[in-house]
């Protein structure tokens, strides 16, 4: 985890609140890199990202791609990313580019440095001062009817035969997972889901996270403890010396009110549980970091 925070440029905000609509936290670019870190912490050798730079500024997009580039170079990880309208600095970071036309046909696949020559072969020679707008020009050609048809013909004659030959010579009887793991250096072992960890370890980790969240929200903490103390005093005065009497009805009323008050106070945490629904689905069912029993008991405690 510490390694990912350093590589993704999040080390200096490791103790900061993520924030949300009501409370200011880390920036949008840092949130996107945090999402990448959550996907990388489970140790994948191949990671798919769908529009990871959408909604980010050009600078934040560049920082996110630089972080992924560093991970790929350092640990021989593979990233398959869907990205729209990349700036030229981001475009040159990719080792291979696959571009589709408006109707779903592949019109280019290869290194970014070979794109200019490829477009010239397809009948679209380089324009003066085009380098900065090269990704936009490729997308413009792929989105138009006649230019995309010309690119498709060039793809079928120059690139498609090589792609088909590589697919044909893939090892027979082996899964994609085994092939990817074979070429992985850092994450060489298959990931062991956190849900297979001991139940006590899951509960301890979840309780530690929940407690840190409560302590950081000082306003909620003060209001919760203050209201608990006030209601405790009111109940104590209302049922003062009830134990010394032989009135079973009064004693039963006290037990009922105490139980009801405890149950009502648990509703204070319902907004938290509801807001964590998406996070729970991703961590428990998607990434399998913990089991549902540990999460439910942690919230109950």
Image (spheres, helix red, strand yellow):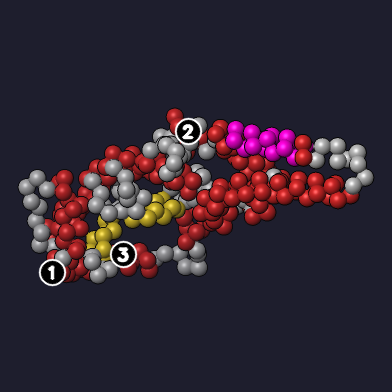
Identified at 34% across, 53% down, the residue is 51
**Label 3 close to label 2 by CB (< 8 Å):** no
Q: Which stretch is magenta?
A: 222-236
Examine the rendering and report whether any part of residue 45 can be seen. Answer: yes
Q: Nearer the viewer, mark 2 or mark 1?
A: 2
Label 2 Cα crowd, 10 Å radius (few <14 / some 14-19 / many 20+): few
Cα gap from disc 3 to disc 1, whole angstroms: 24 Å
- Residue identified by numbered label 3: 163
44 left or right of 244 in image = left
- Residue at 32% across, 50% down: 54
Per the picture, the main secondary structure of the magenta-coloured stretch is helix
User: Along the line of sight, which residue is nearer the eye, 64 or 56?
Assistant: 56
Percent x, y for residue 124? 10, 59
Helix, strand or loop status at disc 2: loop
Query: Which residue is denoted by mark 1 in the rendering?
Result: 146
Q: Was residue 223 drawn as part of the magenta stretch in this picture? A: yes
Q: Are marks 3 and 1 in contact (CB under 8 Å)?
A: no
Q: Element at badge 1? A: helix
Mark 2–mark 1 Cα distance, whole angstroms, equals 52 Å
Q: Residue at x 84, y 50 (%)?
A: 252
Q: Which residue is mark 2?
A: 16
The image position of residue 141, as x and y in percent, is: 16, 61
Numbered disc 3: secondary structure: helix
């Amino acid at each position: 985890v510490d390694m990912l925070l350093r590589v993704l440029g999040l080390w200096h905000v490791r103790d900061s609140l993520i924030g949300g609509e009501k409370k200011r936290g880390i920036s949008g670019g840092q949130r996107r890199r945090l999402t990448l870190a959550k996907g990388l912490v489970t140790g994948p050798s191949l990671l798919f990202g769908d529009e990871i730079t959408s909604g980010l500024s050009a600078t934040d997009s560049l920082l996110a791609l630089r972080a992924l580039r560093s991970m790929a170079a350092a640990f021989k990880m593979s990233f398959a990313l869907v990205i729209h309208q990349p700036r030229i600095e981001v475009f040159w970071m990719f080792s291979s580019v696959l571009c589709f036309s408006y109707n779903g046909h592949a019109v280019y696949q290869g290194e970014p440095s070979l794109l200019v020559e490829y477009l010239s072969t397809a009948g679209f020679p380089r324009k003066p001062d085009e380098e900065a707008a090269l990704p936009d020009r490729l997308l413009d050609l792929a989105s138009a009817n006649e230019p995309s048809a010309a690119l498709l013909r060039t793809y079928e004659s120059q690139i498609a035969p090589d792609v088909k030959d590589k697919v044909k010579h893939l090892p027979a009887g082996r899964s994609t997972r085994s092939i990817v793991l074979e070429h992985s250096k850092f994450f060489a072992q298959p990931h062991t889901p956190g849900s297979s960890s001991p139940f006590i370890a899951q509960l301890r980790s979840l309780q530690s996270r929940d407690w840190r969240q409560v302590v950081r929200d000082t306003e909620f903490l003060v209001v919760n403890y203050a209201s608990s103390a006030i209601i405790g005093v009111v109940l104590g005065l209302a049922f003062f010396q009830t134990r010394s009497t032989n009135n079973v009805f009064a004693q039963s009323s006290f037990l009922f009110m105490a139980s009801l008050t405890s149950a009502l106070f648990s509703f204070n945490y319902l907004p938290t549980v509801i807001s964590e629904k998406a996070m729970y689905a991703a961590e428990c069912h998607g990434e399998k970091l913990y089991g549902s029993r540990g999460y439910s008991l942690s919230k109950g405690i």
